[in-house]
Amino acid sequence: MLDPFMKSLGFEAEIPEPGRARVWADLKPEHLNNWGSAHGGFLYTLADSAFALASNSRGCLAVALSTHMEYIKASRPGVRLEAEAREVHLGRSTGVYSVEVRAGGALLAMFTGTAFRKADKPPALSPD
């Protein structure tokens, strides 16, 4: 289910049901920016990974058309970060997803993504 990039970052994931996904990782020193908080690119990658898994969970290939991220709060190393994606719209050729990135109960970032669905192609997800 995880692609090589997700695996290289130490991500773990689950797809509890079609249209939803959860991805998590421990925030390590190598994931920090110069100010000692979670690097925005790391948070984005965590959210984007949850979006990818949720949008590809319905049996057809989905690719991103657009994404947007709002950074809300900083986080420190040693915490577990979690991105939870949920489908908010599913059409014939597009899907819209909302992702919250949290550390414990604290909301760190919000992500939205729109995916184009190619119904004639199976997803590239493979079970791990």
Image (cartoon, rainbow, N blue to C red):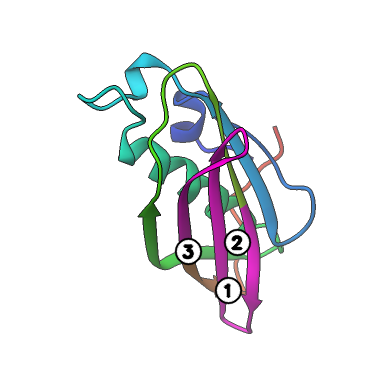
Q: Compared to 24, does 125 lie above or below?
A: below
Along the horizontal axis of the image, is 20 left or right of 17?
Answer: left
**Viewer-nearest residue: 38 or 114:** 38
User: Can you identify the residue that label 3 sits on?
Assistant: 112
Dot 2, crowdedness within 10 Å: few (<14), some or many (≥20)? many
Q: Which residue is mark 1?
A: 95
Horizontal and vertical percent position of residue 106: 55, 40
* CB within 8 Å, label 2 to label 1: yes
* Between discs 3 and 1, the one toward the N terminus: 1
Nearer the observer: mark 3 or 1; the answer is 3
| Neighbour tally class for label 3: few under 14, some 14-19, many 20 plus, Cα within 10 Å | many
Sequence-earlier tag: 2 or 1: 2
Q: Secondary structure at mark 1?
A: strand
Q: Amino acid at mark 2?
A: Ser
Name the amino acid type tagged 1: Gly
Tell me the residue that label 2 is attached to. Answer: 55
Residue located at (38% from left, 36% from top) = 74
The answer to whether 60 is drawn above or below residue 78 in the figure is below
Q: Is residue 34 magenta?
A: no
**Label 3 vs 2, first from the N-terminus:** 2
| Alpha carbon separation for disc pair 2 and 1 | 7 Å
Q: Which residues are magenta?
A: 85-112
